[in-house]
Image (cartoon, rainbow, N blue to C red):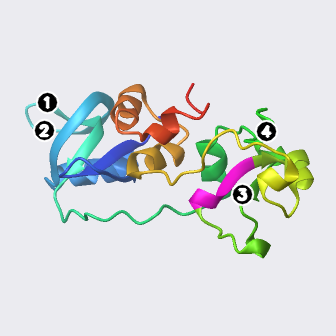
Amino acid sequence: MNAKILRLNKAGIPVSWLTREETATLIVKDLVIWSLGDIVFEMRGGVNRNGVQSVLKLPSIVACDGKVHDEFADPPLENKFLFRRDRNLCLYCGKVFPYRELSRDHVHPISKGGLDVWTNVVTSCRRCNNRKADRLPEVAGMELLAVPFVPNPYEFLYLSNHNVLADQMEFLRARFSDSLHTGGLDS
């Protein structure tokens, strides 16, 4: 099983992805306060003197006790997350490309005062990025197909895992912002 278990804080906000070993440790230490979803793995242990084998069932989503942070720092801006946010779609020509043929485009170029932040970057094919060059889209005669946005915690956890299980996706997707559902990016 390559699938990870989704870890939430006690308020139900996603925190991280866990391995089955990390999840088992949290359960055994009685740190899981509630869980959701299907059982995704069963860990079998030793056999007691009555011949009964211990079994630890791991759900796909666990919530753990601890401090709840109200603020959410922007997730790290990395091309793998950016390209996944934009679904490998060039936001200028509208075509889908393999990862190696994509690049990060600064809508407002850095040389003209733009910043390297989620709200100023989009996925672009190399051809469109070269065509736009060091200009604003409107100056280059190019239309942006969607507005760049900062992924919320639910969206970022989705972007950071390529093996999201159906019940995990249902939990995360219900909390996606309108940005991920609109702008031609929703499937």
Distance CA(mark 4)–CA(mark 3): 21 Å
Instruction: Identify the residue under disc 1.
Output: 51
* Numbered label attached to residue 98: 4
Instruction: Give whichever of 47, 28 is nearer the camera.
Output: 28
Residue drawn where x is 79% and y is 37% of the image: 97
x and y, in percent, of residue 116 in the image: 65, 68
Amino acid type at circle 4 is: Pro
Q: Report if residue 154 is visible in the image.
A: yes
Determine the secondary structure under disc 3: loop
Nearer mark to the viewer, of 1 and 4: 4
Residue drawn where x is 79% and y is 51% of the image: 138
x and y, in percent, of residue 102 in the image: 79, 47
Tag 2 or tag 3, which sits nearer the N-term? Answer: 2
Instruction: Identify the residue under disc 2.
Output: 48
Distance CA(mark 1)–CA(mark 3): 66 Å
Determine the secondary structure under disc 4: loop
Residue drawn where x is 49% and y is 33% of the image: 181
